[in-house]
Amino acid sequence: MACDAWREKLDAYVDGELAPSEANALSAHMRDCSACAAEALQRVQMKRALATAGKRYEPSAELRARVANSVSTKRRWKLRWQWLIVAVPALMVLVISILVNLSVQREKALGQRVYSELTDLHVAALASATPVDVLSTDRHTVKPWFEGKLPFTFNLPELQGSEFTLLGARVTYLEQTPGAHLIYQLRKHRISVFIFPEQSGQLAKLHSGPVSALSFNLESWTQNGLRYFVVGDVSADDIRALSKLLQNAG
C-alpha cells in the first residue's frame, strides 16, 4: 500500500516537480524498495530516449527555411486579405460616390438642356410677329382650342383680381413631343407657360422647384400626369404667383 502512494509521485519526482521534503522521502524509500527504484529508472530512461529522439530528428536548415518561408507566405496572404477586407468596402464607397456624382451631373446637364430649350422657345415666341396661334384673353376660348391638337387636357386659372392677363396660346414641341405654350402678361413683361406630358422623354427625371437659367426665372412641377414650366424675365416671386394660380386651377 505504501508503494502505491509513492508510485503516484514517480512522474513528478523524475520531472523535478516534487517539494524537497517529498523528494527526499521518496529517495529514501527507493533505497529500500527495488520495485519503486526500477520504475523510477524506467521513467528516467524513457525521458532520456524521448529527448535523444527529438535531437536525432532535428530538422535541417533547408527544412527550417521552407517552413519559415511557408509561414511568411501565409502571413503575407493574411495581410493581403486583411488589406482587401479594408480596401474593398472603401472601393465600393468610392465607386458608389462616383456613380451618384455622375448621375447628379447627368441630371444637372439634362436640366440645363431642357431649361435652355424652353428659354429659347420663350424668346422665339416673343420675337415672332405672331407669338400665338389663338389670340384670346378668355380661358374658355383658349382651352377648347387645344382639343384635337394635344393628347391631353388641362385647366386654366381664373385671373380676375390678379395682375396677370392671358394673351393667347400655341402648340409647341419639346423633345419631339407636342405641348401647350401659353403666354401671359404681367405689367410690361410676358411670361411663358409650357405644359407637356410628364412621361415624355427625359422630363420625368427633372426635379421640381424654382430654377434660374440665363437671365430668366423658371419654376417647374408635375400635376395630374403633366409637367408644367413657367418661364419669364420677371422676379421669382412673380413666377411663383402665376405657378400657384395654375396649380390651384389644376
Image (cartoon, helix red, strand yellow):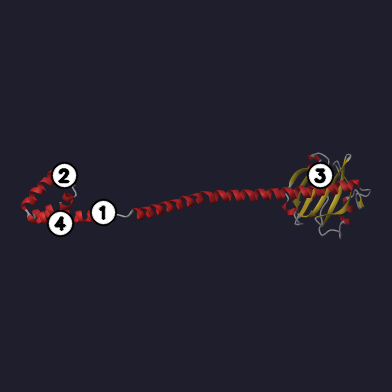
> Separation of disc 2 and disc 4 at Cα?
21 Å
Query: Which residue is identified by label 4?
Result: 42
The amino acid beneath tag 4 is: Gln
- Check the image and report above or below for 162 versus 84: above
> Separation of disc 2 and disc 1 at Cα?
30 Å
Query: Which residue is identified by label 1?
Result: 55
Which residue sits at x=58%, y=49%? 93
Residue 39 seen in render: yes
Q: Could you say whether the residue bearing mark 1 is in a helix, strand or loop?
A: helix
User: In terms of sequence position, does the residue under pointer 3 or pointer 4 come before the other?
Assistant: 4
Marks 4 & 1, CB-CB < 8 Å contact: no
> Separation of disc 4 and disc 1 at Cα?
20 Å
User: In terms of sequence position, does the residue under pointer 1 or pointer 3 come before the other?
Assistant: 1
User: In terms of sequence position, does the residue under pointer 2 or pointer 1 come before the other?
Assistant: 2
Q: Could you say whether the residue bearing mark 3 is in a helix, strand or loop?
A: helix
Numbered-mark total = 4
> Separation of disc 1 and disc 3 at Cα?
99 Å
Residue 158 seen in render: no
Query: Which residue is identified by label 2?
Result: 19
> Separation of disc 3 and disc 4 at Cα?
110 Å
Residue 39, horizontal then vertical, whole percent: 13, 56
User: In the image, 170: left or right of 20?
Assistant: right
Which residue sits at x=77%, y=45%? 219
Return the residue nearer the eye: 62 or 171.
62
User: In terms of sequence position, does the residue under pointer 2 or pointer 3 come before the other?
Assistant: 2
Comparing labels 2 and 3, the label whose residue is closer to the camera: 2
The amino acid beneath tag 2 is: Ala
- Packing grade of label 4 (10 A; few <14, some 14-19, many >=20) is few
